[in-house]
Image (spheres, helix red, strand yellow):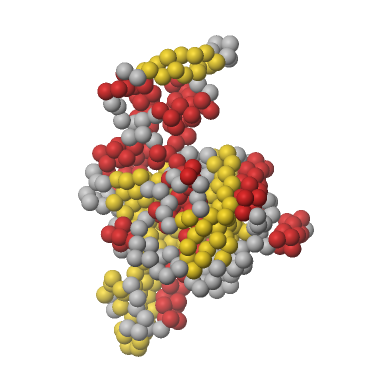
Amino acid sequence: MRNPSTLTPRIRPVPPNKTAILSALDVGTSKVVCLIARLDPIEGSDVLSGRTHRMRILGIGHQRSRGIKGGTVIDLGEAEKAIRLAVDSAERMAGVQVASALVNISGGRIGSHHFAGRVALHRRNVEQSDIHRVIEVASSHAQDAGRSILHALPVGYSLDGAGGIQEPMGMVGEQLGVDLHIASCDPLAAHNLMLAVERGHLAVEALVATPYASALSTLCDDEAELGSVVIDIGGGTTSIAVFNQGHLVHCDTIAVGGNYITLDIARGLSMRLDDAEKLKNRFASCIETEADNRDILSIRQIGEDDRDQSHAMPLGQLTRIVAPRAEEIVEFVRERLDKAGFHIAKGQHVLLTGGTAQLGGLTELSKRVFGTQVRMARPVGVQGLPEAAKSPAFASAVGLLVYPQVAGKEFFEAGRRSALQMTGTGGYIARVGQWLRDSF
């Protein structure tokens, strides 16, 4: 069995002067999305400085998720079916076959830890080998934690105890130190997700933490530098990413999301789940208004004989069901951040993304709970997305396409090579090879 800390594959960054075709697979509790995109080199951007390529969507496929609960695979066969259908739709639209994909992970109790490392310099200039050595020392502390490492990001360096150094190359000192942020998850959750993807004859290029992916597609440089919190509220999980001075410094997930609101509506109004979901998407709000008791909704309820019956009710009744759960989710986020030592300060930016971020009144509710400015965030810097996909619900999928452009910031262990080909497509031969590996 593979070492838990080396279970998840890593991807090498896309060379800034090369064109690539990549596929991204967002495996969520509510939906599975596959994006196939062409990445063309561009000059640097003042607003999105981490982007080295222009992203143009060639194909998109999305299916209702199956076999996933709380971001974790609970039925391999059903999850494989949903993944196959989404990938097939994207391939048909793009006119290409993909052999591998970047995949996000929301389950597996994603968490963050910071590790320090120090190495002696003996009053000489810092070289690249010294930076690699000090990061290796820091990462060695994470090897025995029994968790799969998703990301290893140097947050800052120090020389002789003086911190705040972003680029120590060429500087002189006695001792070089590093603060290394490790984002990790439970190894079995990661392994089962990879199995579901690989059973569809796709290689996993990299597993990317959902909060990191969502932040990559929605944050601009100023927000990341000044300090921001990105909250991705999906169907089964709520993911949190904290950025400071341009670095991801904390990530977390909570196993609660918009599906819980749907369940509350279905139970409170005796409705079928599909009808409750539609009602939530069309009319639900977590802020009461004067019109709530004036506007009347016509809904379908399950009768005693299991037949649907029409029923009229005031809009306010729906609001009173939705509001407590929405506030509970936001309070959960605030408590988890406080517990981790990342209290949201007044003036700090908070971004809401994910499908449930579109819930009416959620931005205003979050402003009240966090006491600072909050905005709903959509993916930016991508071309060719259909209008229906230009929404917060597709933030993590687009972020997966941004990830190979910034992967160079991460620490790569020796021997951890990616299978990424610069065409991004493997065709028939790659699929036969994958089938042989799976079968024998």
Query: Which residue ends up furthest to the top in the rendered image?
Result: 304
- Which residue occupies 47% across, 51% down? 396
Q: Quadrant of residue 285?
A: top left
From the image, which quarter does the N terminus lie in? bottom right
At which x and y percent is residue 303? 53, 13
Q: Is residue 435 left or right of residue 322?
A: right
Question: Relative to the observer, which residue lies in front, 55 or 7?
Answer: 55
Instruction: Tell me, yes or no, if residue 18 can be seen here.
Output: yes
Q: Residue at x 30, y 22 (%)?
A: 291
* Total tally of numbered discs in the picture: 0
Q: Does residue 3 sit above or below 251 in this rendering?
A: below
Going 57% across and 49% down the picture, which residue do you hit? 60
Give the quadrant of residue 430.
bottom right
Image x and y of residue 121, in percent: 36, 84
259 relative to 201 in the view: left or right: left
Residue 327 at what x, y percent from top left? 33, 35
Note whether 264 is above or below 384 in the view shown: above
**Camera-side residue of 230 and 328:** 230
Whether residue 115 is visible to the viewer of this picture, yes or no, is no
Q: x%, y% of residue 172?
A: 31, 85
* Quadrant including the C terminus: bottom right
- Judged from this view, the residue extending furthest toward the left is 346
- The residue nearer to you, when weighing 313 against 234, is 313
Residue 2 quadrant: bottom right
Residue ID at (39%, 35%): 359
